[in-house]
Amino acid sequence: MKIALFPGSFDPLTKGHVEIITKGLSFFDKVIVAIGRNSQKKYLFDIETRKQWISDVFKDFPSVEVVIYEGLTIDFCHKIGANFLLRGLRSCSDFEYEKGIAFANKEMNPQIETVFLLSSPATFNISSTIVRDIIVNNGDYSHFVPKEIKF
């Protein structure tokens, strides 16, 4: 079984994330969306809310599972039996950043392969950082997130 782990903070989940997860289902038997818990980071939304939103968005997709994890992503892959790390790319700078992480992960566990999927022109400009800024400043965020995300 080909299992991919799609890690992130998803603060909040965006239409870009949804696109990468959906595309990933074309290549993998299962995509596990893993929300990383990092006590050093300050989040806009609590982790249980983020998990619920992702679960709601993918409630009709039995091949998508949503989990919360701590520690190194590569260790979590091994723990749950994921063979692949799924990452989305929007730009050249995303690639440069992700490439370094992929090489480090490969050094730590050569059995786990990182797979990059490109965002479409419709979503390449969406980032959680931009969406959070819109939300904090009371802007209309609905163009950038799935309809299930409301607060």
Image (spheres, rainbow, N blue to C red):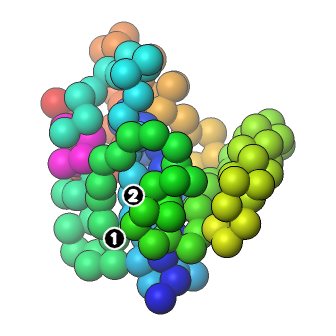
Pointer 2 local density, CA inside 10 Å: few below 14, some 14–19, many at least 20: many
Residue at mark 1 to residue at mark 2: CA–CA distance = 7 Å
Task: Name the residue at 19% across, 39% down.
Answer: 48
Q: Secondary structure at mark 2?
A: strand
Task: Name the residue at 45% across, 40% down.
Answer: 71
Q: Are marks 1 and 2 in contact (CB under 8 Å)?
A: yes
Task: Name the residue at 49% across, 70% down.
Answer: 82
* Corner quadrant of residue 138: top left
Q: Earlier in the sequence, mark 1 or mark 2?
A: 2
State the residue in front, 73 or 108: 108
Q: Which residue is mark 2?
A: 33
Q: Is residue 70 magenta?
A: no
Q: Residue furthest top?
A: 137
Part of the protein shown in magenta: 49-53
Q: Which residue is mark 1?
A: 64
Q: x, y percentage for residue 73?
A: 52, 49
